[in-house]
Amino acid sequence: MKSEKKTLILGAGIAGLSAAWHLRKKGISCPVFEKEGEVGGLCRSKKVHGFTFDYSGHLLHFKNSYAFNLVRKLFREQFVKHERSAWISTYGRYTRYPFQANLFGLPPRVIKECLEGFVRAQKRKRGGSIKETMNFSQWTRQTFGEGIARHFMDPYNAKFWTVPPGELTCEWLDRMIPVPSLKQVFEGANKESKKQLGYNVHFWYPRKGGIEQLPQAFVKSLEHVYVRNKISRIDLAKREIETSSGRRERFDALISTIPLPEMSHLIPGLSKEMRAVFKRLRWNSILNLNLGVSLNGDTLKRHWIYFPKKENCFFRVGFPHNFSSDLAPEGKGSLYAEVSYSDCKPINKQKAISHITRDLKKIGLLSPKDKICAKDINDIKYGYPIYDRHYKAAREKALSFLHKNGIFPCGRYGSWRYMSMEDAILDGKRVAEMLTRA
Ligand SMILES: Cc1cc2nc3c(=O)[nH]c(=O)nc-3n(C[C@H](O)[C@H](O)[C@H](O)COP(=O)(O)OP(=O)(O)OC[C@H]3O[C@@H](n4cnc5c(N)ncnc54)[C@H](O)[C@@H]3O)c2cc1C
């Protein structure tokens, strides 16, 4: 990219900040426009009555050494490695995560169905599995068998994604769902196993201040970050953006971390066909309730718990005071509960909040004696892109149209992929390098 070419960055979440930081490293200073009053996007934290709450649990997992070293440098080593303590609440008891490798403690009938199904699936699978042509429901049956599919994979994923598992493709799976060996499944059914499995066996978390320390560390070396600058229009013919306060800026290249479906509202004059493409993108939303409380002793050591059954309205509850003791005042604890919703599964948000508290009490995570000292609600409109049969073609067409017009989407919502914070950082780096090579 020649220095006279003007690049603008839309959105100061972790992806936009990473793009700006990597461009800065190459001596290119790009303005970043952010609609909110502060940077960080989903990686922000709030202080409420002495508690620090993230927008929802945000833990760092690393599979890439560049990302790990960069974050370590940014944090000046002020982040701590934890061994995960993740659980599943089902059939009135807690078992270890992942379900498929930790059947011990479940009712004998359930264990029997899961083991028999797994053995049958292993025998059938000899020919290999073709993830690309299967829907998620078929893949779980082929991989784990009918028992594990019916007792965990179906109910949990239907609750989380808000669409039936048969409507999901397997494009998002990658490393998300660990597949244990036959030996591991039997071992985990016979006794409580402490052997951890999966991509998120460990996580890292800032020693102090919540996850927002990460975007704050990026922003320190950036000069032109403009908060309260919401992009309201992108004029492709003039190559110009406009903010809601009327400010206009010309661009040669735009790095956009704005959620992909929003782009069709920002670009005037899109063809009917292109608008239909953007409309095919679907997502779920997350209603998150953070509570500062006095917790009962049993939950004290846990990091998070999954809830596959309909009888609890949330799909996950986590305990931030176990990520860092700095997040709650002494003698207090904090928890967050997450509920999924979408057009396919609408909710009444007011009722949902009171249902969360009701269900936390029902399962004993809140006792009648517990005093709620702090409360914070986050309604996250764009939670997870839904990988259905239209996902791949619609995403590719949308991205290709934007590329042709000098817009380079990036990050979880810009690129429209199931990304972690680490992935979003690396995606910011990717787009910065792509533009400096051009
Ligand atoms: C419930 C939940 C839990 C998660 N937990 C984890 C976890 O434990 N670990 C992990 O690694 N990842 C987790 N993630 C994923 C992680 O949050 C994302 O990968 C990452 O934050 C994405 O960063 P981003 O910059 O791509 O998007 P965002 O953080 O959404 O940033 C986009 C920015 O663009 C701004 N913007 C939007 N529209 C406009 C506009 N019109 N004009 C100007 N600015 C605009 C937004 O305000 C925002 O600041 C979780 C995600 C969710 C939803």
Image (cartoon, rainbow, N blue to C red):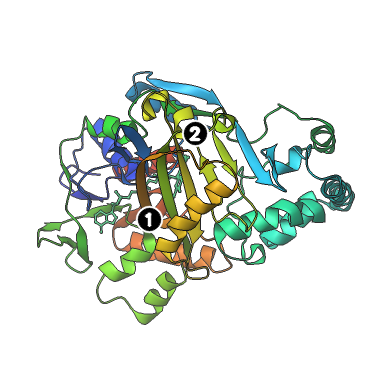
Crowding at mark 1 (Cα within 10 Å: few <14, some 14-19, many 20+): some
Instruction: State the separation of the CA atoms marked 2 and 1.
Output: 24 Å
- Taking depth in this image into account, of 81 and 348 the one nearest to the observer is 348
Whether residue 435 appears in this view of the structure is yes
Measured along the vertical axis of the image, is residue 243 above or below residue 16?
A: below
- Left or right of 395, for residue 176: right
On the image, the x and y values in percent for residue 242 come to 15, 62
Callout 2 amino acid: Leu
Measured along the vertical axis of the image, is residue 407 above or below residue 105?
A: below
Nearer the camera: disc 2 or disc 1: 2
- Taking depth in this image into account, of 105 and 72 the one nearest to the observer is 105
Callout 1 amino acid: Asp
- Left or right of 58, for residue 435: left
Residue at 48% in and 28% down: 322
Crowding at mark 2 (Cα within 10 Å: few <14, some 14-19, many 20+): many
Which structural element holds mark 1? strand
- Left or right of 295, for residue 430: left
In the picture as drawn, the residue positioned furthest to the top comes out as 77
Whether residue 129 appears in this view of the structure is no
Question: Which label was assigned to residue 295?
Answer: 2
In the picture as drawn, the residue positioned furthest to the front comes out as 369
List the residue tagged with mark 1: 379
Image quadrant of residue 95? top right
Q: Quadrant of the N terminus?
A: top left
Which structural element holds mark 2? loop
In the picture as drawn, the residue positioned furthest to the bottom comes out as 272
- Left or right of 309, for residue 55: left
Residue at 53% in and 24% down: 82
